[in-house]
Image (cartoon, grey):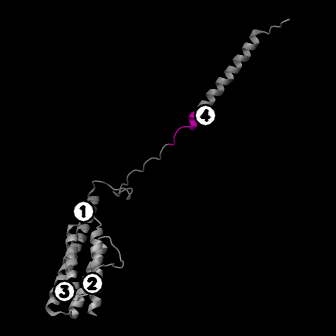
Amino acid sequence: MFIRKNPTRSGRRAGAMLLGLSVLLIAASSAYAQTAKPPTPPPLDPPPSNGAKPDSSMPDFGSRESEMRASLALKAEKKQYDENLERAREASQLATQLLETYEAKQLFSSEDDKKLERLEKLTKRIRNEAGGSESKADVKDIPNAMTTAIKRLAELADDLRKLVEKTPRHVISAAVIDQANKLIGLVQHVRDLTR
């Protein structure tokens, strides 16, 4: 005994299930499509009508104002570099004058003490411009004899001048800093000897 079901009834059920699943699938895909869109960026602000730049943090390449700023910055850097070169030349001249004076008189006057002080200030400024900082000058092989110390002072000042002249203005030179530290230490030693 085998009972056979009505084929039309089971066909209707399968059709209804298939219809329900397809409606559910369409609804899910349309809901996903609505939430998956990326957010649109906010609209850009129109440029102000008074001629001012909308955002001063963004450079305006090619404008006369930015070109003028760049030109002024380059001129200021060049001026600083030229002043540093002049300091190095003056330091070398002072050291040479001190050597000549000491060789002639075998002692220093108050004017020579002022020159030593000026030489030390110039050398510190050169060191600071080269990227160095205040530090204890560690000079080895400091001569004890005054004549030898003054000769060495003139040599170090001239070497410092040459290094500053060779160094480009955008470079931090460890050699200039080291040479300046040596010269500062020697100047301080000579000043102690003259007291």
Q: Are marks 1 and 2 in contact (CB under 8 Å)?
A: no
Alpha-carbon span between mark 3 and mark 1: 41 Å
Q: Secondary structure at mark 1?
A: helix
N-term mark: 4 or 3: 4
**Amino acid at circle 3:** Leu
Alpha-carbon span between mark 4 and mark 3: 91 Å
In the rendered image, which residue does mark 3 sit on? 98
Other residues around mark 1 within 10 Å, as few (<14) / some (14–19) / many (≥20): few
**Amino acid at circle 1:** Ser
Check the image and report above or below for 182 versus 114. Answer: above
Closer to us: 193 or 98: 193
Q: Is residue 38 magenta?
A: yes
Alpha-carbon span between mark 2 and mark 3: 11 Å
Q: Are marks 1 and 4 in contact (CB under 8 Å)?
A: no
Check the image and report above or below for 151 versus 175. Answer: below
N-term mark: 4 or 2: 4
Closer to us: 7 or 84: 84
In the rendered image, which residue does mark 1 sit on? 71
> Which stretch appears magenta?
30-39
The disc placed on residue 187 is: 2
Q: Secondary structure at mark 3?
A: helix
Check the image and report above or below for 63 versus 79. Answer: above
Alpha-carbon span between mark 1 and mark 4: 59 Å
N-term mark: 1 or 4: 4
Q: Is residue 90 magenta?
A: no
Residue at the spot 71% in from the left edge and 19% down from the top edge? 16
Residue 52 percent coordinates (x, y)? 35, 58
In the rendered image, which residue does mark 4 sit on? 31
Alpha-carbon span between mark 1 and mark 2: 39 Å
Residue 133 percent coordinates (x, y)? 35, 74
N-term mark: 1 or 2: 1
